[in-house]
Amino acid sequence: MVAAPMHILDRKLVRDLWTFRGQASSIVLVLACAAAAMSMSFSVQRSLDATREDYYRRYGFADLFASVPHAPLSLAETIRGIPGVAAVAARIAGHGAISIDGFDEPITGRLMSLPENGDSQVNALALRQGRSPAPDHGGADSPPDRPREVIISESFAAAHGLRPGSRLTMTIGGHRRVLTVAGIALSPEYIYAVGPGQIVPDNHRFGIVWMERLELAADLGLPDQFNDLAVRLSLGASAAGVTETLDRLLAPYGGTDIHDRTQQYSHAFVSNQLKELGAIGVLVPAIFLGVAVFLLHASMLRIIALQRVQIGIIKALGFAGRTIGWHYVKFALALAGAATVLGLPVGIALGYGMTRIYAEFFHFPFLHYGPDMPAVAGVVAVLACAATLAALHPAGRAAALRPAVAMLPALPVAYRRSAGGRLARRLTAPAAMVLRQLGRRPLRPVLTTATIAFAVGLQIATLFSFDALDEMVDVFYARAQRQDATIVFAAPVPAAVLADIARWPGVRAVDGRRDMPARLSVAGASRHVVLTGLPAGGTLHRLLDLALVPIPVPGHGIALSRRLATILHARVGDRVTVDSATGRSFELPVTALVEQYIGMGAYMELAALDRLLGDGSIVTGAEVKLAGDDGPRFHRALKDSPIVAGFVPRLAAVTAFRETMARTLTIIVSFFVAFAGIAAFAIVDATVRVALSERVRELAIMRALGFDTGTIVFMLAGELVVAVVAALPLGSVVGLGLGQLIVWNLDNDLFHVPLVVGWRSYAIAGGTALAAATVSFALAARRLRGIDIPAALRVGAT
């Protein structure tokens, strides 16, 4: 007796899915977009994280890093004995200028010494091509013109078409050396490799070069010494305790910069990217789900309203209200199940492709990818919960209907004089009927408007990232930085060298700068940053306030970027304690907050910083303005200068930044934009279909009274056009709100994404909604032409 009634409702469920297949398909499509977005994001984030951690483990990525002017190599044995230290790499590091035939611009090379025993337990190299340099090849006493064997980074080799056996020339410590590429490798230390003055990788102008220790020590004048330290800790060791001991041991040898992984640039960038993927992977699919739940809830309310008589008959046959409620919940769960079957494979396939792209960009030597079963189970559970949540209220209304009431026709709308009645009398009959219909059933167009507004907002929330990228480039590389290039010196030099640079060919203007690593503290909160001294009358690097208006460099205080001020909980007027890497400490008031979309920092007048440090007028770099016709001679001057460690052309930096963002954040956002477009089309189509199902009996009556199809389509379209037009501005507001949620989740130490929406994003979002409405109206008109009038009048719905 129990199986038969359930069998009847199950057959009804199948018929309902077929009857409302148009609306159901649209809802399934929206839910499938959410499922695909979730599975794609989770699989990419988890796979990359697993790949990175395995890479770190296999190749011994260091936990602590330190730099020192110079320290005796014997000190490394003492450091190895510190409790909690598992392995130590005492290295020699430096910079040199690389020259490659066919590439005229200067190339900065980061020089790193190889371990003498050919094996390393810290930051080991993953050899991709070739071999390690021969230990007996070209020792320190070899002729200077004899080629030395080196290993170079894979990304640099790919950018210049280098392979084992290729030759390049490099200026090291003032000596010109011919180098032969013995091997090409990857390093866990340089997953994200940036050179001096760079913010994002530029593989054409920066590369890593690993060289035999004795050769590099001889060229840099560091025999039996080291100036760079990488430490790997034992499991469970205290990083703070080891850092304190290291600081004490290295202090006698000059100022030290000791930091852990979180402040190592490569690790910090990759970690921020993975966090962004995780945040976007939760937030954007949640937005999709929210829109889908709203659409499913509204659709089911209307379906139940259309099936009032059927519900009354089923109840009169003895079915309990709970059974009928469960029937409609199963309807929603069936849609969620179809969306899961459709969306999960798409998300997993896209996730694999995206993971490969990210792995190549991050330069992982291998890749771990596979369907994340907990994530798959989570997607299934989330979709089921979302569908159930959307169906509970409509199912409750169906369960509460009394048979006698449900089998009666719905009460007709009370026709009374409306505020627009006088206007309606001046319109044509169809237009007047549209106006009266909107006034007498206001809830229906309000729900339609809200649903379409979410579709528009969903697109704006995903499209704005492209506008934000343009704004970041414009503010950082055009309004704030007006130089043509940035020169980074190999070591701090007297400011007098700026006069020499001003006489180089093609140089029109020069501004010096001083970058100093420091720890800034405010009321217990602290952060290691770069404190930059800028000239008071400088014009090439400007500070912008929070309204993006240029402001002077503080002469008696310090300016903090917005992000840094937030981290330190600092406001204008607070006092900041500055602990420099040289051991000097001083206190300064915060006199301004500045907007900085890329990176974060602190700024003050260069002369004031020199006075506080007490070591004379020093600069670590220079901003230069160039004449457009003397580039080759300027580049030769750069290559011949022994004090230059890095050169960053602004145009090249902009190109590299756009390429980097295009291959990181923009990759996944592009898929979300596509999903949002599909979802927007499906939402509008479902809304039109539901509205047509709701009105089909009224429209059939009008056909029976002699109204032609064109007039009827005009009346249906008129109500929906009003909803679509009203939804466009409302959708813009919704999109800005959703975009703000995304911005809050993307904000990190490296990038501050502004909430900027350009006219193109509004046009695309609005155009998608209008196009979807046009196509849906055309399909509705086609359906109206084939309507069975007698059947529609008898049943009241199709």
Image: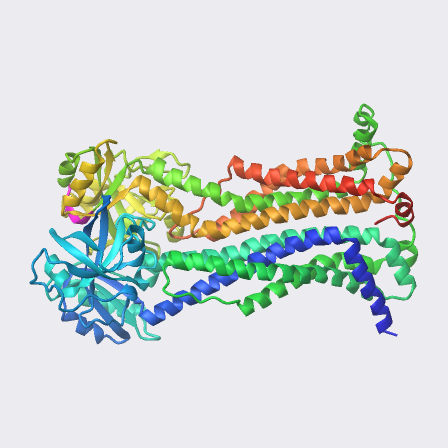
All told, the count of numbered labels is: 0
Q: How is the image coloured?
A: rainbow
**For residue 13, which quarter of the picture?**
bottom right
Q: Who is closer to the viewer here, 717 or 148?
A: 148
Residue 303 coordinates in the image, percent (x, y): 79, 52
Residue at the location (31% across, 35% down)?
Answer: 482
Horizontal relation, residue 402 to residue 267: left or right: right
In this view, which residue lies farthest toward the front? 165
Residue range in magenta is: 489-495
Q: Position of residue 128 (x, y in %)?
A: 31, 64
| Farthest top residue in view | 426
**Left or right of 169: which side holds 194?**
right
- Residue in the foreground of this view, choosing between 713 and 287: 713
Position of 5 relative to 196 (above/below)? below
Can the viewer see residue 561?
Answer: no
Looking at the figure, which quarter contains the N terminus? bottom right
Say whether residue 764 is magenta. no
Q: Along the horizontal axis of the image, is 281 left or right of 252?
A: right
Q: Position of residue 170 (x, y in %)?
A: 17, 52
